[in-house]
Amino acid sequence: MTVEPPSTEKLAAVPKVAVVPKVAVVPKVAATKVRPAPPKQPVPPLQLYVVKGAPDACGRGCDSWIAVEGTIDSNAAARFRKFLTRVRGRNLPFYFASPGGNLTQAVAMGTMLREKPAIARVGWTVVNECGFEAQDSEACLKLKQSGRDLHGEVSTRGAFCGSACPYLIFGATTREVAPDAALVVHSAKIVLNFRGPGTPPPELVAAANGTMENVSGVGDAAQMFTAGGETGYASRVLMLYVAKGNAFLTIGVSGFGNDAVALEKAKFVAQKLLDRL
């Protein structure tokens, strides 16, 4: 039996079928613009308020504390003194959380803490009355400024006290910083506040810049900061910082023409004060 191959004509009659793989059709998506990050909000000025928490919230037998948080502004010391008068006799620990601010105000506040036994710690507070509002929102700040005792929790984890803030803690007779909190100190600087019209000339800005140098012969450790006077736009300023034991002093001298003479005068005053401690 002979099998004949199909004729060419029959093969041509068979339609060709192309196998096409399935391809998912993805609609075009318009490129979305990336929204810029919102501007960083400035840290509110220093807030002072009393908080009551759960039993032992701030240590064994301690359920209430004083929260001190925010930027140390140019009027902070006056508010701090008024606040201390209001809470006199309550003997509560202080919890500080501040990025710093005005050094002069911080030193003045630290001096006030030195006037009576005080415990200073680094910690941040969450106020329950603020609810779902942010702790630095306008509504929450009004509560903290109300003068009434609030309720909340305190934590040392990630708490920060930097720049001028440590000068507050240095003034307390007892200072406690938890391992998970941060206490940061850096060299001081003069900040030029120009209130005139327009912008200050470069010479005036340069005159506000200064240097920090180590000083020997007084206390356990000392540094001095000098600035101004080089251009004739600003008065010459010398700040002497001295630490000895638990004592910390700041001596300021201005309106002089010779740094060496001004330093000797500042060291003389510092030594007299240290002798009385």
Image (spheres, grey):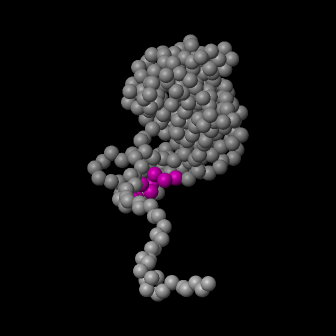
Q: Quadrant of the N terminus?
A: bottom right
x and y percent of residue 202 in the render? 39, 59
Dividing the image into 4 quarters, which one contains the C terminus? Answer: top right
Name which residue lies at 45% across and 54% down: 207
203 and 9: which is toward the camera: 9
Q: Residue at x 48, y 16 (%)?
A: 149
* Vertical relation: 135 (above or below) 255: above
**Front-lying residue, 136 or 4:** 4
Q: Residue at x 45, y 73 (%)?
A: 17
Going 41% across and 80% down the picture, which residue do you hit? 13
x and y, in percent, of residue 101 in the image: 49, 39
Q: Is residue 263 magenta?
A: no
Vertical position of residue 191 compared to residue 59: above or below: below
Left or right: residue 103 versus residue 158 is left
Specify start and end residues of the magenta stretch as a single range: 202-210
Quadrant housing residue 12: bottom left
Q: Main secondary structure of the magenta part?
A: helix
Q: Position of residue 64 (x, y in %)?
A: 57, 17
In the rendered image, the residue lying farthest to the front is 1
Q: Is residue 179 left or right of residue 152?
A: right
Q: Is residue 41 left or right of residue 180?
A: left
